[in-house]
Image (spheres, helix red, strand yellow):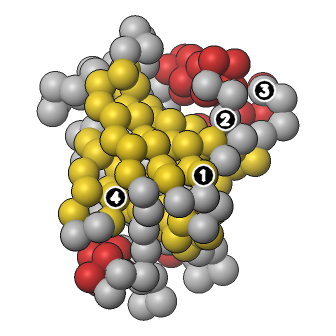
Amino acid sequence: MRLGVISDSHGELDNLRQAASMLINEWKVDKIVHLGDECEDTVVFQEYPPQEIIQVHGVYCSHYQDPSIINRPLINIEGHRCLFTHTDKPHRNDLPEDPDPQELARQKKVDIIFYGHSHIPEIRQQDGIIWLNPGHLKNEDKKGFAPSFAVAELLERKATLKLIKLHTGEILEQITSPV
């Protein structure tokens, strides 16, 4: 299973279209994940062939306070327990039933945590857990990082995750790990 992972599009629809096009046409992803902030931007995905979308709402999105919506889905993909969340730690806007990503990691109840919010692209492995932040899609960001996204190839007993610079396609970072 190959996932395209996007976060923090913040209304930059041209960049979101470019990322979606690259993910679908070049990376041949099976699913696209949008990790929040400006959840309404996902309307762009309707312009492409049907793709399964995993959508997470940002902590300031009005949908985040709707108890009928799962803010932090935990999904098993090819044997990997994947948490999809906007933040990598609890947030003051969390609902009482929202799991704490840090606690799930401490208890070894997840293998990979996909998160956004910080706009800082990174892949790190900590205590056997992989943490991936695909960065953001803004043209200008005060933290100084260029727009980026990620691709995660999840196979039984193996995960390969890549951070990719949006405008050049350059692979910024990559990790392959048995999980």
Q: Label 3: few (<14), some or many (≥20) within 10 Å?
A: few
Disc number at residue 155?
Answer: 1
**x and y, in percent, of residue 146 in the image:** 28, 21
* Amino acid at pointer 2: Val
The residue drawn where x is 44% and y is 62% is: 179
Q: Amino acid at mark 4?
A: Ile
Mark 4 lies on a secondary structure that is: strand
Front-lying residue, 119 or 67: 119
CA–CA distance between discs 1 and 4? 15 Å
Which mark is first along the chain, 3 or 2? 2
Asked if 24 appears above or below 92 in the picture, the reply is above
* Residue that label 4 marks: 130
Residue with the mark numbered 3: 48
Residue at 57% from the left image edge and 50% from the top image edge: 154
Mark sitting earlier along the chain (3/4)? 3
Tell me the residue that label 2 is attached to.
Answer: 29
**Gap in angstroms between the C-alphas marked 4 and 2:** 20 Å
Q: Residue furthest right?
A: 50
